[in-house]
Amino acid sequence: MATHPQNYWSFIEAYYPNYCSCDAVLLSDILLRKLEGEVIDAKDEALIEGWDIKKKLLELDSIIMEKAIKNYFSMHYPE
């Protein structure tokens, strides 16, 4: 996997539900690798063809982070 910015990704790893099996996390990794100029699988290239990679990655990581934060709060401050 590509190296996500550690200033927020370690939080997501810790608190995102089903982190290891989440399609959104996988897509985020693919988009980051593409943004950083790494070679990605041809099927992934076809999937994201024509996308604004930076914009989509920002949107996706924002959604992922929001879910991680909500999970954090539900774990640490249950009702």
Image (spheres, rainbow, N blue to C red):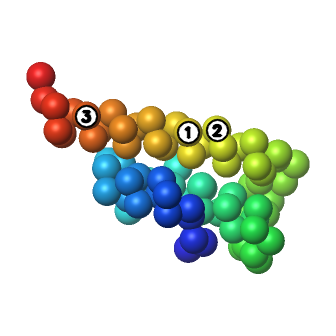
User: How many other residues sit within 10 Å of disc 2, few (<14), some (14-19) or many (≥20)?
Assistant: few
- The residue tagged 2 is 59
The vertical placement of 42 against 5, above or below, is below
- Discs 2/3, front: 3
Q: Position of residue 45 (x, y in %)?
A: 78, 63
Query: Which residue occupies 60% across, 72% down?
Result: 2
Secondary structure under badge 1? helix
- At label 2, which amino acid type do we have? Glu
Nearer the observer, 66 or 41:
66
Nearer the observer, 71 or 77:
77
- The residue tagged 1 is 62
- Asked if disc 1 and disc 2 are in contact, CB closer than 8 Å, the reply is yes
Q: Position of residue 5 (x, y in %)?
A: 56, 62
- The residue tagged 3 is 73
Q: Position of residue 35 (x, y in %)?
A: 76, 62
Query: Which residue occupies 56% across, 64% down?
Result: 4
The vertical placement of 72 against 22, above or below, is above
The vertical placement of 26 against 16, above or below, is below
Query: Picture quarter containing residue 37?
Result: bottom right
Q: Gap between marks 2 and 3, in whole Å?
A: 21 Å
- At label 3, which amino acid type do we have? Phe
- At label 1, which amino acid type do we have? Ser
Residue furthest toward the bottom? 39
- Asked if disc 2 and disc 3 are in contact, CB closer than 8 Å, the reply is no
Any part of residue 2 in sight: yes
Horizontal side of residue 58 vs 7, given as left or right: right
Number of numbered callouts drawn: 3
Query: Picture quarter containing residue 36?
Result: bottom right
Q: Position of residue 38 (x, y in %)?
A: 75, 75
